[in-house]
Image (cartoon, rainbow, N blue to C red):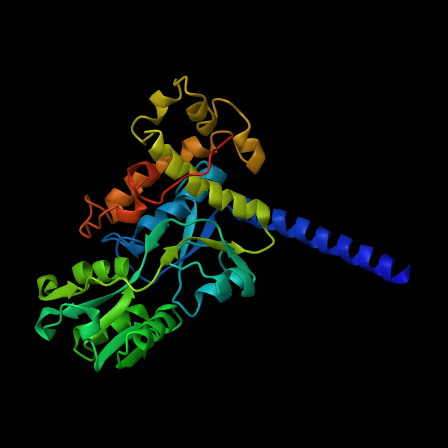
Amino acid sequence: MKLITKSVVGAALTLGALAGAQAATLDVVQKRGEVRCGTTTGFAGFSAPDAKGVWQGLDVDLCRAVAAAVFGDANKIKVVPLNSQQRFTALQSGEVDVLTRNTTVTQQRDTALGITHAGINFYDGQGFLVPKALGVKSATELNGASICMQTGTSNENTMADWARAHNVEYKPVVIETFDEVVNAFAAGRCDVFSTDASGLASIRISKLQNPDDYIVLPEIISKEPLGPFVRRGDDGWRNIVSWSLNAMIEAEEYGITSANVDEQTQSQNPNIKRILGVTPGAGANLGLDEKWAYNIIKQVGNYGESFDRNVGEASPLKIPRGLNAQWTQGGLMYALPIR
């Protein structure tokens, strides 16, 4: 009986702790008056300051979407630039409320670090950027090459695994910060830069003096699903982050844009009425105003709008939608229904 009593008490304490954790982040954020988002230290198209010092990018838009959902104001954010070594500690310690930076979802990260992912906002894969002067057309020709990578990322292990499987010997040049890796590659300290393909496109356009002197090799050697992370045990906050992303994806599916969202509030489509809060319920489920998704779409836009202006055809990167297209267009972007 003593053992049973101790177990019951222990379970009750655990449930009580979890219940407290679930409410904690939203309460802290609302009292503070801003959402603190961990981003990269500068990754064009995803999270980087513009000429006026205002942070822009696909990941920053997700941060702004969360603020729009919570406050009705997408500008109530604080961007906290973090390198790969700092990012998880900053989230675990509460320095940031959410990581909205190019972070790969892996089993180890989702189970062993006290954090959990809250969706996928970009499907990517690890690739290779090389100078055309190197004269290679395939990654299988990189035997003996020196390869620059950033420490603390999944790229190191992926590269090692791929090289063993393909009998390719290489010299790793591992450097701590992203900008230092870019500078090392540009200076010729290594033959190859290996990171996520989106990063290679960003580096080629925004960091290298003569982009046409470089090519991205055709091989993609890994699956790199990138998405936001939150602290584990805070289900209420995870729901807000996850459903903010879902609202952007589903808005694109239904053709709801920042330009027509007011008009769409008159739609007779039951799904659109639920998304925009005309039919109440979804906001209450999250502990938010019923216009939470309307505010996201009005102030930030749907997923397609965010993709196009930051990394797609309307941006210097011009990354094709590919896997990041809607599921109805052959991609993997499939929103969970808001109902």
The answer to whether 245 is drawn above or below residue 271 in the figure is: below
Q: Is residue 26 visible?
A: no
Q: Which residue is drawn at 48% across and 33% down?
A: 338
Quadrant of res 182: bottom left
Q: Which residue is drawn at 31% across and 46% down?
A: 324
Q: Which residue is drawn at 38% across and 55% down?
A: 226
For residue 258, side relative to residue 35 (left or right): left
Residue 178, how many percent across, how many down?
Answer: 30, 68
Quadrant where the N terminus is found in the figure = bottom right
Q: Is residue 282 visible?
A: yes
Residue 252, how many percent across, how many down?
Answer: 34, 34
Question: Closer to the camera, 7 or 25?
Answer: 7
Residue 204, how many percent across, how many down?
Answer: 18, 62
The answer to whether 133 is drawn above or below residue 69 in the figure is: below
The answer to whether 305 is drawn above or below residue 151 in the figure is: above
Question: Closer to the camera, 141 or 115?
Answer: 141
Quadrant of res 164: bottom left
Question: Closer to the camera, 133 or 138?
Answer: 138
Q: Residue at x 84, y 60 (%)?
A: 6
Quadrant of res 269: top left
